[in-house]
Image (cartoon, rainbow, N blue to C red):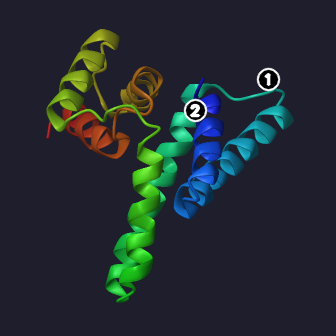
Amino acid sequence: MLRRRLADRLKKGMKDKDACVVSTVRLILAAVKDRDIASRTKGGGEEVSDQDILGVLQMMVRQREEAIVLYEKGGREELARQEAEEIRVIRSFLPEQMSDDETASAVHATIAEIGAEGIKDMGRTMALLKERYAGRMNFGRASAVVKSELTGR
């Protein structure tokens, strides 16, 4: 379903002559294709799931956010604006992001559900959160909450 939305958005962007949308969606599709190829070489299926695509999209947003910080430090405002526009396009394919309170609530519920007791359970906790909230949760923030909860800090 997400692949269809990406293809439709590419066509619309081409029709509207929106260079930012076209280039960004092409970058997304290339990243998804790379993930498909990696999956096949590991013996996986033909195409990765929508959940995997959401992970790719989140990674792309994170990369661009980091680039914006560097561009702004270097006085390259035009490049920072371009990255921000790409983020806007990428986020249009992501579901609405969870707030910090919703993230904390989901972390608490997941920890309680699996009976996580210490930092050794962080991997299991994060894996379950990623499975359930792919594309909706900022896992950097969630990781900090999980670590805090599991270490008692």
Q: Position of residue 131 (x, y in %)?
A: 47, 23
Badge 1: residue crowd in 10 Å (few <14, some 14–19, many ≥20): few
Residue at screen point 50% across, 49% down: 59
Disc marking residue 45: 1
> Would residue 55 be found to the left or right of residue 98 on screen?
right
Residue at screen point 42% across, 62% down: 85
Secondary element type, mark 1: loop
Give 93 or 153, whichever is nearer the viewer.
93
Give 139 or 126, whichever is nearer the viewer.
139
Give 98 or 43, whichever is nearer the viewer.
98
Q: Amino acid at mark 1?
A: Gly
Disc marking residue 11: none
Q: Is residue 68 above or below residue 146?
A: below
Secondary element type, mark 2: helix
Q: Quadrant of residue 87?
A: bottom left
Q: Position of residue 147 (x, y in %)?
A: 27, 39
Q: Quadrant of the N terminus?
A: top right
Q: Quadrant of residue 148?
A: top left
Q: Quadrant of residue 152?
A: top left
Q: Is residue 52 above or below residue 81?
A: above
Residue at screen point 24% across, 16% down: 109
Q: Is residue 105 above or below residue 21?
A: above
Residue extending farthest to the top is 113
For marks 1 and 2, give the one nearer the viewer.
2
Disc marking residue 5: 2
Q: Position of residue 47 (x, y in %)?
A: 75, 28
Badge 2: residue crowd in 10 Å (few <14, some 14–19, many ≥20): few
> Would residue 36 be found to the left or right of residue 18 on screen?
right
Mark 1 and mark 2 lie on one chain; the one further toward the N terminus is 2
Residue at screen point 32% across, 40% down: 143
Q: Position of residue 64 (x, y in %)?
A: 45, 62
Q: Amino acid at mark 2?
A: Arg
